[in-house]
Every structure is written in structure tokens, then in C-alpha cells.
Image: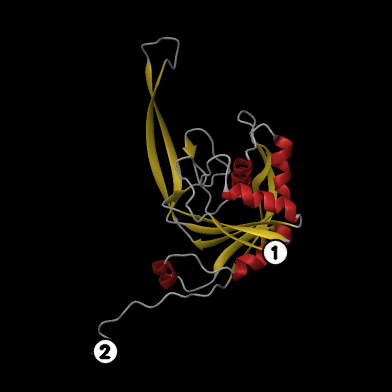
Amino acid sequence: MRTILLKFAGPLQSWGTASHFESRHTDLYPSKSAVIGMIAAALGYRRSEDEKIRRLNQLHFAVRADQEGKITEDYQTAHQYKYKPDPVLERTYVTHRYYLEDAVFLAAVGHEDDQWMAKIEKALRYPYFQLYLGRRSCPVTADCLFDVTDQDVISALKQAPWQAAGWYKRMHQGPIYLYADAELLPNGKRSFRRDQVVSLAERGRKYALRQESSALVQVENDSRPEHDVFASI
């Protein structure tokens, strides 16, 4: 088993799985379909190459919510001319876009085919297309490719250092959530999520339901307490 760890951090990110048109919502943590899309972009796959992209569904997937962000809304307007046959008419097009602010996630993808994983690792180091955290306005950070290990995805995430900011660690001492393909966490709480890629074609995107499990995992808190200037008085 070879596992690649990806760190998703930045001012804003968005992981929508069930929104269209004017309102674009975000889930509270990255979807498997978004990470598959990111890997497909790194490999240089075109949206129409369904068979190549669907093969990526075979990757074992898990994600750890190291720092839960807060949802923020971006209210946007755009002018759309010639909305009707009369060229004089003008329409203001309003959209509501939602993002996660100040969130940090550690995602893991793995497979038993080491050669395939080596190819994916190389592509993530030197991506063919630019990679984004869900939207084009949210590019990945320089430390996106966090680590590569021979552990399975669950073990890799359980042992990886906590990536939250110091202030967040001081405020949240307890365990954090881990979400994974259901078979990887057989004793976890199960639910369905529509993020199994069927097609990423521009005019025919299609996703199937995927069963996932969630569990709380304990991570080592290496943050130092704030200096108390009155302690020595």
C-alpha cells in the first residue's frame, strides 16, 4: 500500500457536492470527487476522458478535519446583456457563493498498485493543470503535497502531526473528525454522499452515491500555553 497525503489550507476553499445555478454551497470537508478531479487535473486528463477518471474512484480515500473553518458568503453580481431578443434589455445576474474560511484538512489517497501511485505522486509534484481547492479563486498552497508513506490511508492520517494553527489547538483540545470510504472504517458512523465520479464532462457531469464512515481520532497537541505574565507575581 502506498499513500499520498495532501494538505488543504488557505484563506478560502469550497467543496460543493449538491448545488447548482445561483446558489453554490460548500460542504464542511473535502469530497472524494473533488480530490479525484484534482488528481485528474494533475495527470492532464480532459473532462471527456471518463474511463481514465472513473478509474480514480478505486483509490482509497480519507480526510481529517484538522481545523474546522467557518462558512462565509460571497455575494456577486454580473451584468448579462441580450438576455432576451431585445438588445436594449439588461439583466443583473445575482449569485451567492459559499466558502470555508480558515479551514485546514489533511486528505489521504492510497492504493496497492505502487507504480500507479508513483505516477500520481509525480503528477501532483508537477501538475499538468493548475490545482484548486474547489474553485478557481482558491489555488492550492505550496505545501499541498504533504507526505508519501507506505502505510494505509487510515494509519497515515492517525499518525500524521496535527496541522491546525496554534490558536486553534489551544481552543480545541479534544479529538478531531476523520471521514473515509465506509470499508476503511467498518466501525464508524455511516452515511451516503453523492461524490463518486461517473463523468466530469462539462455538459454532463454525473455523480453516484458513495458510502462513507466517520469517527473521532485523537491527535497529539503540541501547542504551548500562552505566556501568563501574572503567574510569577
Mark 2 is surrounded, within 10 Å at the Cα level, by few (under 14), some (14 to 19) or many (20 or more) other residues, namely few
Going by the picture, which residue comes out furthest to the right? Answer: 113
Q: In front: 187, or 108?
A: 108
Residue position marked by numbered label 2 in the rendering: 232
Mark 2: secondary structure: loop
Task: Give percent across and percent down for residue 98.
Answer: 45, 44
Q: Is residue 59 visible?
A: no
**Would residue 168 appear left or right of 120 to someone viewing this image?**
left
Figure quadrant of the N terminus: bottom right
Give me the residue at 38% from left, 21% from top.
Answer: 91
Going by the picture, which residue comes out furthest to the left? Answer: 233
Give me the residue at 63% from left, 50% from top.
Answer: 122
Task: Give percent across and percent down for residue 127.
Answer: 57, 44
Task: Give percent across and percent down for residue 139.
Answer: 47, 45
Mark 1 is surrounded, within 10 Å at the Cα level, by few (under 14), some (14 to 19) or many (20 or more) other residues, namely many
Res 147 → quadrant: bottom right
Give me the residue at 48% from left, 60% from top.
Answer: 68
The answer to whether residue 75 is above or below residue 151 is: above
Residue position marked by numbered label 1 in the rendering: 152
Name the residue type under label 2. Answer: Ser
**Would residue 143 appear left or right of 115 to someone viewing this image?**
left
The answer to whether residue 184 is above or below residue 87 is: below
Mark 1: secondary structure: loop
Name the residue type under label 1. Answer: Asp
Task: Give percent across and percent down for residue 24.
Answer: 49, 40
Which of the two discs, 1 and 2, labels the residue nearer the N terminus? 1
Q: CA distance from mark 1 to mark 2?
A: 48 Å
